[in-house]
Amino acid sequence: MSCNPAIGGLAKGQMVREIDALGGEMAINTDVTGIQFRLLNKSKGPAVQSPRAQCDKKAYQFRLKHTLELQPNLQVFQATVTGMIYSHGRVVGCRTSLDVDFIGRTVVITTGTFLRGLMHVGQSKNEGGRLGDFSAKTLSASLLEAGIELKRLKTGTPPRILGRSINFAGLQEQKGDIEPTLFAFHDTRDPGDMFHVESTGERRLGWKPGSEQVSCWLTHTTPASERIVRENLHKSAMYSGEIAGVGPRYCPSIEDKFVRFADKARHLLFLEPEGRNTNEYYINGLSTSLPFDVQVDLVHTIPGLEAAVILRPAYAVEYDFAIPTQMYPSLESRKAENLFLAGQINGTSGYEEAAAQGLVAGVNAVLKVRGEPPLVIQRHEAYIGVLIDDLVTKGTTEPYRMFTSRAEHRLLFNHGSSELRLYDHAKKHKLLSDNRLERVAKKANRITHWEIYLETSKSVGGSWAESIRCDKSTAALPAEFSAEPKEVREEVLYRVTYRGYLEREQRQIEKMKDVEKIRIPASLDFLGIPGLRRESAQKLHQLRPQNLGQASRISGVNPTDISILMVLLAARRNAPAR
Amino acid sequence: MSIPSDTIVALGTPFGTSAIAVVRASGPLAAELVRKIFGGSSQPRTIRRADYRDARGLVVDDVLFTYFAAPNSFTGEAMLEISCHGNPFIAQKILEDLVGRGCRPAEAGEFSKRAFLNGRLDLSQAEAVMDLIHARSEQALAAANQQLRGALGRQMNILISQLVKVLSHIEAYIDFPDEDLPPEDRLVVVRELEGLQASTSRLLATSHYGELLRAGIKTVILGEPNAGKSSLLNRLVGRERALVSSEPGTTRDYLEEYVIFGPYFFRFVDTAGLNPAPGPLEKRSMEMTLEQADNADIYLWVIDSTCPLPSLPLALAPRMTPANTIAVFNKIDLPSAKRGPLPQAFPDVSISALNGAGLEALQATVTKLAESFQVKIGEEIIAINTRHAHSLEQARVCLASAKDNLEQNDFSELVASNLRAALDAYGQIAGKIDNEQVLDKLFASFCIGK
Ligand SMILES: Cc1cc2nc3c(=O)[nH]c(=O)nc-3n(C[C@H](O)[C@H](O)[C@H](O)COP(=O)(O)OP(=O)(O)OC[C@H]3O[C@@H](n4cnc5c(N)ncnc54)[C@H](O)[C@@H]3O)c2cc1C
Ligand SMILES: Nc1nc2c(ncn2[C@@H]2O[C@H](COP(=O)(O)OP(=O)(O)O)[C@@H](O)[C@H]2O)c(=O)[nH]1
Ligand SMILES: [Mg+2]
């Protein structure tokens, strides 16, 4: 992990549960190595409640590495990849710095921030993708060679400080939830399934997930902090024009915060522990590219950190990313066949966004080898679908992070329904064990059963469902219902309570599905279609949507263009038959 | 190929005054429309005559209609064709009523597109259909662009940026619960929504078939018995509508007729005479006249030019001003009596309802008055079309639901759901509004990010 070992949060928490529903490891790993768990947005509805966890950074990393080592049919090897091996426009393998070549039918690249990574601390520059790491230089050249267009982005991280040197007295404590919301679906798993690494006996489960949580602490900037930042603005890498890459708006540096929101007297900061076996703390909210000496002075202006010792300075990193509209929705490159790209190299930022893409790219690399059609998750199915569709149809100009507001069908994406939403994909590609698939199917049946029951059987005045919607009370529901597991009850009540809203979403989805199903052949020459507006034709030519739904989401393409395409495609489909 | 499952409607003849106008509906609702509008089921492919009754049960026009069962129609779907009188406002009213019953205004070339997709047109016609969609949409686009560049566009941009702002506030509290945001103030949001609702309604009221024009500009013909009011109405309508008689007091009731002059739609109301000394029976008729006159937009005061100038009834005199009243001196084919001065500086026109002299001048004068009745928003003249109105109506409903959500303390994501639906509805007029715009606004107004 490059940064703060926090997993989840709004939209990201849902995404982790979606990853779990598709057999990914992130959720279990977080549950086992989490040291603080909080459910965010408790005062809002189920659709926008999201779990978040603070993990033990090292434990997270080691357990995941261990998982990989124990994975059957997976061979792990460490070396720096220096370039792709191409043959006839296709990728057939990769080269490493150890002069060991790897030949394969498909290749997945997940280089994060390492492509020509350049770190800035004030005016000082170091090559590398992460503090203490190397920078992958020749790989960028190798991608360019295949015609893949690269651009620069930038991100930053705050200083780490020594816990011992913090004066916690007077700081506000933020504790974890007493009853933690975990990420993995425990209800559809056997314990053996759940703690698979631990159950091999090679690793001990040192603690019960969610117990013995640690606290985070709240502090804030002071007028003195602002003065120091302003006086030294010219030394900041970002403000002195040293950095060319575009940074994320949702993760502004402290320089940005003071300059752009000058009317705000102070900015909130979180002190977050990095693990159980380290005394390192992360100052969430204080990312900066000021020089080290200024950082020291700055940190000392913060309540509780008057005598804090910096273990690692804050820095900004600039890196190459591959413009994501050059990929198919399978995450395979359009420019080089058999090459899949996932994670931050595609312009995203965040562990969850990277994990989601890694999962999809991995599955699709295998499907490609087998000659099967790819796994493509639709926008209305999951945040993962929104993520990939946004990337490949719209692209991005800043490090892309998921927000719930990016999803038009957010109300359907409550975290508890992830397994149900993605069941068909999981089943089709055997991403879960048979045992678990069966349990998910059973759970889905129970939910449907109760939905119908509550909607149709009478209680006082009307159906149960009506009384739930009317007074929102669930006190008087049948005893058999109360006996169902929490996961079932919560989903049923959600669906019943918000039926009107959820149905509106469904209607919109149905409308969209028709166009989504109409595929656009790869050979279609958009520029030669009569009647299509020039601007649209060029956009379509450039982005090459694979179906009409995708085409309709491209900015600048209007309903008339879609109508014309629909007629044209129908005509083409019918042509050979006549 | 799966076909959209909604029912579309459009005018099948060019918009304008022609002898008849054809309104077409295509889609699954067609049969139900026949049942609900005309009563009873209909034999496919037979022309029938009936009254078109709107959703409130009022007769809009006497029409011919034909029902086509799927797949034996132009589009291959169930279809309903209605031929009404060529008055575009009648056609508009019918269109509006069909939209109110669940139909959607068709997009450019959509009927042909459906016909093609349902295999009703052969392959060689595909390009023709594409050209048609293109051409129609260019026309529509040109018209729409003209409006969007103008006053409507400016209004829409204001509405959209206000709504984006409201939505971005709601979204900020959803997506960034851990941030140091100022406390959420729902009352402010409610107030902003009220503003948006009001602006949307105001815009909606400028619709060609909106309030003023839906009802027509109400023009009441009044005057003494036998002045020639009914004769004038018949002249204006162009046919024998009112009973004309030399017997004073023939019109006991009131009569109304819809007429178009230039761009305006008038509802002429012929009233019983204003008898200075009414008998018991006339008294009731007079009351009705005054009732009609009470909420009129324009008064045509018909004066028999062969008689001395009568006085205005006291009850009406204060409402009649030079801005809303025309003095019409009738019977100029006869020798006129000596004319005294008018009680106010009303514009005046001299006509003969008998031979039609002066009628054009009257029309021109009426039209001029009507101009002042056009709805103005911020000094700009806006008139929106059926499709715009349909979208604005949707937006208005969604804004109202969002406001309900807030007042009932519902979860923010439900408020947002309704606001997004409203934004989509605005987007149907002004072009798609990307989620990105909401995020842009959000990051511009809040210091977010740790
Ligand atoms: C400074 C910084 C702060 C961040 N803060 C946060 C945060 O607070 N929260 C959050 O969610 N996200 C944060 N991120 C983003 C997050 O770390 C990344 O988005 C995410 O880790 C990307 O995952 P990835 O798998 O794509 O790449 P990475 O996690 O970067 O992994 C890339 C891996 O590829 C290896 N590699 C690279 N090049 C080669 C090569 N040529 N040959 C062999 N191996 C290679 C690297 O050694 C590395 O292990 C931060 C990133 C940075 C750089
Ligand atoms: N000569 C002449 N007679 C008219 C004219 N307009 C109306 N009349 C006659 O006046 C009488 C009354 O007309 P009518 O329209 O019924 O008057 P109302 O009572 O005001 O509705 C009828 O005999 C008409 O033929 C006109 O312009 N010239
Ligand atoms: Mg009369």
Image: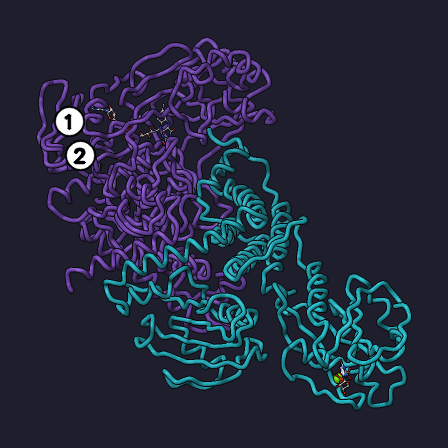
Please, what is the three-letter code of the amino acid marked with disc 2? Ala
Residue A578's image quarter? Answer: bottom left
Q: Residue at x 47, y 51 (%)?
A: B142
**Which residue is drawn at the image coordinates 48% and 65% (left, top)?**
A476
Mark 2 near mark 1, Cβ–Cβ under 8 Å?
Answer: yes
Identify which residue, A394 or B285, lies in the foreground.
B285
Identify the chain drawn in purple. Answer: A
In this structure image, what is the colour of chain B?
A: cyan
Q: Relative to the observer, which residue lies in front, A440 or A127?
A: A127
Q: In this image, B189 relative to A10: left or right?
A: right
Against A37, is B137 above or below?
below
> How far is disc 2 from disc 1 in space, using C-alphas?
10 Å
Determine the residue positioned at 24% across, 46% down.
A525
Is residue B407 in view from this perspective? Answer: no
Label 2: how many Cα within 10 Å (few below 14, some 14–19, many 20+): many
Chain of residue at mark 2: A
Q: Residue A317: give x, y in percent of width and height.
A: 36, 20
The residue identified by callout 1 is: A84
Labels 2 and 1 in the same subunit: yes
The residue tagged 2 is: A336
Residue A6 in which image quadrant: top left
| Circle 1: residue type | Met
